[in-house]
Amino acid sequence: MKAYLQLTLAQLRLFSRNRQVLFWSLFFPIIFMVMLGSLFGSGSTSSLKIFLVDQDQSAASKSFVAKLQETKSAKIVTGTETDQALKDLKHGENELIVVIPKGYETALTKPIKEANAHIQLYYDETNLTTKQTGEYLLNAVVDNISKEKTDYKPIVTVQSEGVQSLNLQYIDFLVPGIVAMMIMSNNLNGVAGQIASWRERGILRRLQSTPLHAYSFIAAQITARLILNASQATIVLLVANLVFHTQVRGSWALLLMFVLLGTLTFMSIGFIIASLARTPESAGPIAGIISFPMLFLGGLFFPINNMPNWVQTIIKLFPIAHLSTSMRQVMNVGEGLATLWPQALLLGSWMVVAFVISSFTFKWE
């Protein structure tokens, strides 16, 4: 027990004295989170930009502009230069151009059978999704105006009832991904590089020649990294709460359990890499080959559901995907273990399999 405690404290002192480890494992993720959160964290609801030109400048055209601006799904930018707007559209600087032509109000005042008022929409032929979205928004406004002019009264109506949902933004999606990224990087890349370096320098060989048991050495490594990861996760969550007002809606104990599972899983994989790598220089690239795809495809920064179905099937085998998903469900939705047991089971399976492999492949020399 004494050797275990001494090794644990020694490992923690190594972490605290290594400025590079502190920067890349703690300060860099925080800086990265603050940078991305400041740029994209608000999750702007304006997904479509419409450049609007009112050539009529009448009461009817201004009423149309006001109704269009009421839509929350588009950002309306008004201007007067139609030709310049069309040039910008060709160069990809505009998404849609809406023109209210001269004579719009006059056309509305004519009898219904003679009415020929219209709104001109210009769109990029290579982006049909934007065109369809723009047509949907304009048709909704135009239909309301037409119904008002014709005094149309619908026979069938729709009764709507609002249901309050969680007001989640991109920063709420990002923070659990940053914590999961830290766990993966610190334990997979960190363990592989450190153990390979100690083996090359003969530190492991000297430890083997002492009365120290292997289980004490491994237990000390696990304990030190658990303390490190728990501390780092807490600091990141506190910074996210202070800067972006994010919350942990679920159980802190369950969140800590997934931190524990993630740490043990990626530590076991890191031990496997350290056993396969002959030198510290080769441990880094091997760890990178494994961690790099998971970094961008594991649901850390982008939703997995937005990816192609065949890619999702592969990604759902990655442990990082289940770690980020489970932490996100605990933090943002407040889910419990009754819902997240499949993720816990898969992470536990990865941990057991990787630990068994690493126990057979681990070498002191």
Image: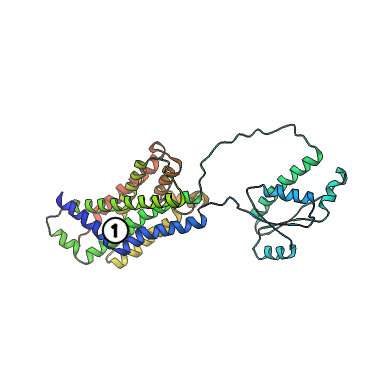
* Horizontal arrangement in the rendering, residue 236 relative to residue 206 (left or right): right
Pick whichever, 36 or 322, lies toward us.
36
- At a point 23% along the width and 66% down the height, the residue shown is 200
* Horizontal arrangement in the rendering, residue 119 relative to residue 325 (left or right): right
For the image, the number of numbered tags is 1
**The quadrant where residue 144 appears:** top right
- At a point 25% along the width and 65% down the height, the residue shown is 197
* Horizontal arrangement in the rendering, residue 206 relative to residue 145 (left or right): left
- At a point 66% along the width and 58% down the height, the residue shown is 95
Give, as a three-letter code, the residue at label 1.
Answer: Val
- The percent position of residue 330, horizontal first and vertical second, equals 41, 42
Examine the rendered structure and indicate whether residue 313 appears above or below residue 23. above
Pick whichever, 60 or 146, lies toward us.
60
Residue beneath disc 1: 191
- At a point 18% along the width and 54% down the height, the residue shown is 6
Near mark 1 (Cα within 10 A), the count class, few <14, some 14-19 or many ≥20, is many
Examine the rendered structure and indicate whether residue 278 appears above or below residue 303. below
- The percent position of residue 179, horizontal first and vertical second, equals 39, 52
